[in-house]
């Protein structure tokens, strides 16, 4: 069993990393958008720590997934909520776990259907490896090396903890 | 009931359920609200909420049904309903084919079955069917093209489930919950497929009372079996109502000696300001449309503050997007599990 | 040719002892509990088989003359033989309608050469069954029609109905009419009850039948015609028949077998198989029809056999053709009622033999000197009705794929083998 990192420490690292990144890029007014459900919790926390004025957005990517032909519609789809104009803005997409990269691909497709942003940056709490698409986080909490049958899940909203579970091969 | 006898009415729900749901309980046809439980109806309403949000974006499309072909098979013409289905399918990125088939055209010799089988051969994934015969979509789903998702856009007097669901969405938006609600349906219930579906939806979602207000000639013979209260006197019937749904009155009813005149009908069963005042002050007024001003409803009421008639277009598209994507999803899931089974058997 | 037949050890229903029968030239010469030792051309060992009189069907659609899609005299009479029937009354609802001696003769000729059982034509009471003009009833009777019916069509109005009855009465002809008030029935195809209410089906109210029954009974009483009411479906109709009979009206009645088993709920899945005219009604109607058969108010059970091609039912319910292919399973369905205690075997047999025979003034029963019309059955064996097993061209049977009790082994009609189980 891998040593599970503590979430508060990861969030500290993310906050620090994101401040540095935004500074480097010269992004003064970022808009945070969390991907349901874990990404929203992380985004809210970052939003609070950074003291951002404009609200945090929530994205449900169910309608943009690439596996509808194979597994059908997610029965727990809920409405996305982006309470701002995305045109010409710098968006910061936040998710709890990045693995194949397909979720991020779907999220970006969805974001572009709201308007044309200036840029999209990616923040991920955990990087599982196992990419199937060329997607990389700009800011990352920790890179995990788990076995191929293990999956990691962020549990929350209070307190936020990380769980590891086994899946069938 | 003898042992050899066919399905009793209580098993009709089960049969409808089995026809419309996959083994895992996912929707694969949307034909009637019979056999669908509260959880399923709530899922449809919740999914529709997500599609309302899509309708508020700049790009009002999602790629769910991209590459799929949806055929609108309207054996009874209806511009309104057909265009909302078409718009819903397009917002799901599907390819849409509109076929207005008059019944007289099919009587050129080609049977309904043959018409549909030809369409299936053109790789259609979904048929949206409106037909003048009760049970037509059942027939199509059961006996003709079971692998094509069938969405019922209204069959005879039997059902109009998408209309009922969009009405339920409107009620939920205004009243938040169905418990404790007293809802009246007023007008030509005998001929109304909308009313039958609305009754079923309200009962399944837990409304406290469904009240039918109509003269005896516009009610089914065995109206008691529908599980609603019946009131011939509309003024009495308006008491305590949270929602009043007005049905359209067709002119043919006068010709069939079901009613003497529009004037008498309006006086007794038309919703005017006086009658509306007898309901609860927060009672909402609904009408599936198109409305006949001065026949079912006074203009002042139709345009008034308690009317929610205009919400329907948005809700209609959202509900239709919801059931179309859910049914497509169920068909896909079934095909996948079937091919997995076949693969395993090799 | 003097063909002879010897049956050994057949059992009569409900009895312990067995009988032997000796048949020659179509007549039962001897029927005895003791063994018969006469030599015969054909000998049948009927051990373990039940002997029943040949059934008589008052309402059977043989579909000939017609276009052959739904069957013909040969196929449907073979089916009827398999069902245990030795006499069927051919409904006039053919194409062309049996409203002329020419058509009657055609039917009789075809039957003579291809039917293994007796076919008695029923003539059309009105030309083309249109209910407007009387047909040549006497001419039809002379050509061989045993009674007159108007199919499932109503007379155009009460005046024509009355005159038709008066004319038939003049010549002592029996009128077999299905009571329906067309204005009340309108476009309905299902009983106007809870299933129609829930599923939005066009309903046929009870009064569409009962109002017509009342009218027909009053007119029959006035004209004195011998009236037979066909295919009753309502409890109230049975009541009215009993009451009219008590007043001395000459009326008989029948009911279709499927009305004794099924109700409006059979249409629950929009199952067009059960689209029939008159429609299947409520459970209390069904119970009253059963009681009517049991106590004799209803004289006969008929098959109302209406074989169809597959396209006839391949459509939404309201536009399908009504009727089922019933003749082969009538008796098995009756046995299921007996097994459930809803009808006595005695009443069932009476309603399939003596009852209908009396309506058309035919002899019935099994006795020395009588016609050799009987069948041999294994009542406890089962069979299933389906496209592979049916002899009829119509596959829309009332109980498809279910285990049906009562397997026929032999059907003897006028001393000849009409059906033999292979």
Image (tube, coloured by chain):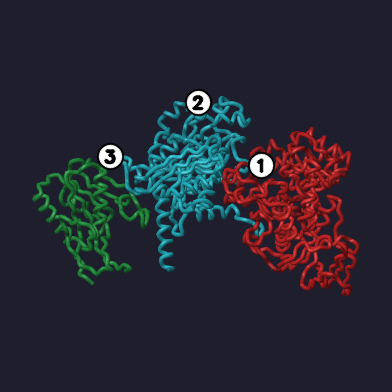
Chain colours: A green, B cyan, C red
| Gap in angstroms between the C-alphas marked 2 and 1 | 33 Å
Secondary structure of the residue carrying tag 1 is strand
Q: Which residue is mark 2?
A: B294
Q: Position of residue C332 (x, y in %)?
A: 71, 61
CB under 8 Å between callouts 1 and 3? no
Q: Is residue B134 left or right of residue A21?
A: right
Q: CA distance from mark 2 to mark 3?
A: 39 Å
The quarter of the displayed image where residue C46 is located:
bottom right
* Camera-side residue of C71 and C156: C71
Look at 82% across and 67% down and name the residue there: C12
Q: State the residue at coordinates (24%, 63%).
A: A162
Report the disc number at residue C352. Answer: none
Q: Which residue is mark 3?
A: B58
Disc 1: which chain? C
Q: Quadrant of residue C53?
A: bottom right
Callout 1: 10 Å neighbours few (<14), some, many (20+)?
A: many
Q: At x 27% / y 47%, what residue is drawn?
A: A110
């Amino acid at each position: 069993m891998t040593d599970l990192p503590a979430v508060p420490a990861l969030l500290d690292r993310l906050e620090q990393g994101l401040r540095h990144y935004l500074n480097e890029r010269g992004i003064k007014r970022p808009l945070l958008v969390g991907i349901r459900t874990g990404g929203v919790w992380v985004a809210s926390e970052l939003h609070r720590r950074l003291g951002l004025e404009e609200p945090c957005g929530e994205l449900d990517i169910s309608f943009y997934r690439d596996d509808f032909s194979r597994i059908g519609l997610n029965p727990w789809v809920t409405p996305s909520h982006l309470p701002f104009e995305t045109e010409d803005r710098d968006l910061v997409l936040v998710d709890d776990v990045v693995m194949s990269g397909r979720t991020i691909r779907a999220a970006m497709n969805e974001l572009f259907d709201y308007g044309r942003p200036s840029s999209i940056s990616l923040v991920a709490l955990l990087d599982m490896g196992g990419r199937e698409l060329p997607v990389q986080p700009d800011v990352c909490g920790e890179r995990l090396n788990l076995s191929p049958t293990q999956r990691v899940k962020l549990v929350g909203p209070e307190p936020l903890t990380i769980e590891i579970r086994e899946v069938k091969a | 009931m003898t042992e050899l006898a066919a399905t009793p009415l209580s098993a009709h729900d089960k049969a409808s359920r089995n026809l419309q749901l996959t083994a895992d309980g996912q929707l694969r046809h949307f034909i009637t609200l019979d056999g669908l439980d509260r959880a399923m109806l709530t899922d449809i309403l919740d999914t529709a909420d997500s599609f309302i949000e899509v309708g508020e974006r700049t790009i009002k499309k999602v790629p769910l049904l991209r590459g799929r072909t949806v055929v609108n098979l309207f054996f009874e013409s209806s511009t309104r309903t057909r265009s909302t289905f078409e718009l819903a399918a397009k917002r799901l990125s599907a390819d849409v084919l509109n076929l207005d088939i008059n019944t007289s055209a099919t009587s050129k010799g080609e049977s309904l079955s043959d018409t549909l089988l030809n369409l299936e051969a053109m790789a259609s994934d979904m048929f949206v069917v409106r037909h003048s015969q009760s049970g037509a979509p059942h027939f199509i789903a059961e006996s003709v093209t079971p692998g094509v998702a069938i969405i019922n856009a209204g069959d005879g007097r039997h059902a109009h489930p998408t209309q009922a669901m969009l009405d339920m969405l409107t009620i939920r938006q205004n009243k938040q919950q169905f418990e404790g609600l007293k809802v009246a349906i007023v007008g030509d219930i005998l001929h109304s497929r909308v009313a039958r579906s609305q009754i079923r939806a309200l009962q399944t979602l837990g409304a406290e009372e469904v009240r039918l207000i109509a003269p005896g000639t516009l009610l089914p013979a065995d109206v008691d079996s529908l599980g609603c209260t019946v009131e011939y006197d509309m003024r009495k019937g308006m008491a305590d109502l949270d929602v009043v749904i007005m049905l359209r009155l067709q002119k043919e009813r006068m010709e069939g000696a079901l009613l003497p005149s529009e004037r008498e009908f309006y006086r007794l069963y038309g919703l005017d300001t006086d009658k509306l005042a007898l309901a609860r002050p927060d009672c909402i007024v609904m009408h599936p449309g198109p409305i006949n001003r001065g026949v079912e409803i006074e203009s002042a009421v139709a345009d008034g503050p308690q009317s929610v008639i205009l919400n329907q277009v948005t809700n209609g598209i959202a509900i239709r997007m919801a059931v179309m994507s859910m049914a497509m999803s169920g068909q896909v899931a079934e095909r996948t599990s079937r091919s997995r089974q076949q693969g395993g058997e090799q | 040719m003097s063909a002879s037949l010897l049956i050994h050890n057949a059992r009569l229903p409900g009895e312990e002892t067995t009988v032997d029968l000796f048949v020659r030239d179509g007549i039962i010469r001897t029927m005895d509990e003791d063994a018969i030792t006469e030599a015969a051309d054909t000998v049948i060992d009927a051990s373990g088989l039940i002997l029943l009189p040949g059934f008589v069907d008052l309402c059977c659609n043989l579909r000939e003359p017609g276009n052959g899609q739904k069957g013909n005299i040969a196929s449907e009479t073979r089916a009827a033989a398999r069902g245990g029937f030795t006499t069927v009354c051919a409904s006039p609802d053919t194409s062309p309608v049996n409203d002329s001696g020419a058509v009657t003769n055609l039917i009789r000729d075809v039957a003579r050469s291809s039917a293994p059982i007796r076919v008695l034509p029923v003539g059309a009471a009105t030309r083309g069954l249109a209910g407007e003009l009387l047909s040549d009833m006497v001419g039809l009777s002379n050509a061989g029609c045993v009674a007159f019916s108007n199919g499932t069509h109503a007379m155009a109005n009460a005046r024509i109905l009355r005159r038709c009855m008066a004319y038939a009465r003049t010549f002592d002809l029996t009128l077999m009419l299905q009571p329906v008030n067309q204005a009340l029935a309108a476009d309905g195809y299902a009983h106007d009850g809870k299933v129609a209410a829930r599923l939005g089906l066009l309903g046929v109210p009870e009064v569409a039948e009962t109002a017509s029954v009342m009218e027909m009974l009053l007119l029959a009483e006035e004209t004195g015609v011998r009236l037979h009411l066909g295919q009753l479906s309502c409890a109230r109709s049975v009541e009215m028949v009993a009451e009219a009979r008590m007043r001395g009206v000459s009326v008989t009645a029948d009911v279709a077998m499927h009305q004794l088993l099924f109700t409006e709920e059979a249409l629950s899945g929009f199952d067009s198989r059960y689209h029939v005219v008159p429609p299947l009604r409520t459970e209390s109607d069904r119970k009253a029809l059963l009681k009517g058969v049991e106590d004799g108010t209803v004289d006969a059970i008929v098959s109302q056999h209406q074989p169809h091609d597959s396209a006839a039912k391949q459509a939404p319910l309201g536009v399908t053709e009504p009727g089922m292919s019933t003749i082969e399973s009538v008796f098995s369905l009756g046995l299921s009622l007996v097994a459930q205690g809803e009808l006595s075997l005695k009443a069932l047999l009476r309603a399939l033999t003596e009852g209908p025979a009396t309506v058309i003034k035919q002899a019935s029963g099994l006795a020395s000197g009588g016609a050799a019309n009987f069948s041999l059955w294994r009542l406890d064996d089962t069979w299933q009705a389906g496209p592979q097993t049916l002899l009829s061209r119509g596959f829309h049977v009332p109980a498809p794929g279910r285990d049906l009790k009562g397997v026929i082994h032999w059907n003897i009609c006028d001393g000849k083998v009409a059906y033999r189980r292979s």
